Amino acid sequence: MLTLARTEIASRPSAASRKSEDPLGQCLQRAATRVTAHRDEAIFWEGDAADHCYRIVTGAVRISKVLPDGRRQIADFFAAGDLIGFEPGASYDFTAEAVVDSVLLKCPRRQLEAFLAEDAAAQRTLLSVALERLSAAQRQMVLLGRKSASEKVASFLSVLSARSRTVTEVYIPMSRTDIADHLGLTIETVSRAFTKLRRQGIIALPRPQHIEILDADALHDLADGACS
Amino acid sequence: MLTLARTEIASRPSAASRKSEDPLGQCLQRAATRVTAHRDEAIFWEGDAADHCYRIVTGAVRISKVLPDGRRQIADFFAAGDLIGFEPGASYDFTAEAVVDSVLLKCPRRQLEAFLAEDAAAQRTLLSVALERLSAAQRQMVLLGRKSASEKVASFLSVLSARSRTVTEVYIPMSRTDIADHLGLTIETVSRAFTKLRRQGIIALPRPQHIEILDADALHDLADGACS
DNA sequence: CGGTTTCTTGAGCGCCGTCAAGTAAGGTGG
DNA sequence: CCACCTTACTTGACGGCGCTCAAGAAACCG
């Protein structure tokens, strides 16, 4: 089936996803079990005991927090190669759910902790990953706090295209609801922003989950807030 | 002078700020030089070569990113004991400025890197700090993306009081502009939110930079989005 | 005490959220 | 392959929260 391949976001060029800098790989290979999570299925919930870490093999995962009245914020999306659920405390402080049908390696936390205690290089890699994510989180804060709806959507597409294998043709695995909850908007506003970008000739939308970037420069300028 | 003591935010109860879990201390003591930064003075700029790390001795520091047209987002505030400027890449990806006159320990990055390579415990501590900050960043994303102006200000005061030595009387070292840029609001909206909390009897504002929390439960409920 | 900066308050507007309807896409069974 | 149903996305009208512009009040400092 070609569908599975198309539903994947390409891995980010982060340290952990490259074979040559993947000291966690051997640990996970030995101690981990293979699990699957179907579309919209939870991998773990915020507040659960953080007993396991997960490495995404195929698919895509969203991590989110929800307010008592249901308002949701998706902090980030992850793809093949990424590690999730390695927590500072005893319990997960966000919920992780599969965006599309996904396969993961499930590794006991104690096992990973023990491995890290003996392998300084692996620990250093994990520190780099954490710092990289912190950097991404800060960019997302600028987006959420200071960008307009159009700029938010342009930024999102910009990041997605950078992660994508094909730069101009980008497949969007997540729903408009997920995009809205990631950008601090409503689905209607996201949809209107897409339409606006299409009318400006910056993107084409052959199908809702399939965009083509027609003017990359304009998209990036808009994303970086360098437009009037 | 009592003023200096009053202008400090109390240190967070993070791992790195406690003496017993401070393996970085000895490294910094040996290799670091003492520097001062006056109110609103930059410690380093986004894009500069990240050659040094800093540990705050006294005072308070804000880290921020600015869009081309001047829109600013303050990602976080730091206080005595906190380490800033330890970057994943070759250059700083945010600007650090003193909120009040501050004293810092300036340590060459190479020195710290070398120290970390030999001390696994210190590295583990740094990983914990990074993960803790990532967790805080995710909470801030919920705030920026999904909370109302009143909820944002209530959350801010809630965090500030948790970090403060005295729980009910809280000193606010930063300006309304800083608060606004941290919460994704304007100074006018921040001011109006303060007034609203005062009229609701949740806080008192004897002076602009000095608040008293009269109803902690109501403040926390509002901060957590558990109100109508 | 005067000057400067910071904070507060007010009036009006605009972006985005809400509510509602319409349209397209996808999946299922005949 | 197509009718049917369900779900997801798009578009429109309207209102409200928060931004903009402007003035006034308070705090801070020499």
Image (cartoon, coloured by chain):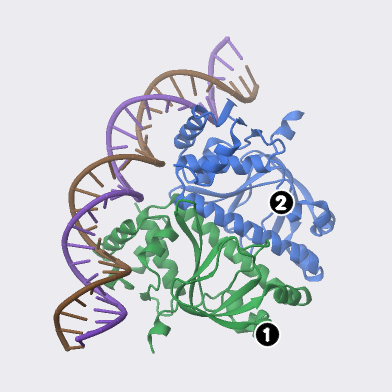
Chain colours: A green, B blue, C purple, D brown
Residue behind mark 2: B82
Tag 1 residue? A26
The amino acid pointed to by label 2 is Asp
> Relative to the observer, which residue lies in front, B121 or A74?
A74
Residue A218 horizontal/vertical position (percent): 34, 63
| x then y, percent, for residue A148 | 38, 52
* Position above or below: C19 against A62: above
Q: Amino acid at mark 1?
A: Gln
Does residue B207 show up? no
Could you tell whether C1 is left or right of A203 in the image?
A: right
Whether residue B80 is visible to the viewer of this picture, yes or no, is yes
Q: Position of residue A139 (x, y in %)?
A: 51, 58
D25 on left or right of B108:
left
Q: Quadrant of the N terminus of chain A?
A: bottom left
Left or right: residue B134 compared with residue A152:
right
Subunit bearing disc 1:
A
Q: Residue at coordinates 63% horizontally, 84% vertically from top-left?
A: A20
| Residue at 64 percent of width and 72 percent of height | A52
- Position in image of residue A140 (x %, y %): 49, 58
Q: Quadrant of residue A213?
A: bottom left
Q: Are marks 2 and 1 in contact (CB under 8 Å)?
A: no
In-front residue for pair A166/B39: A166
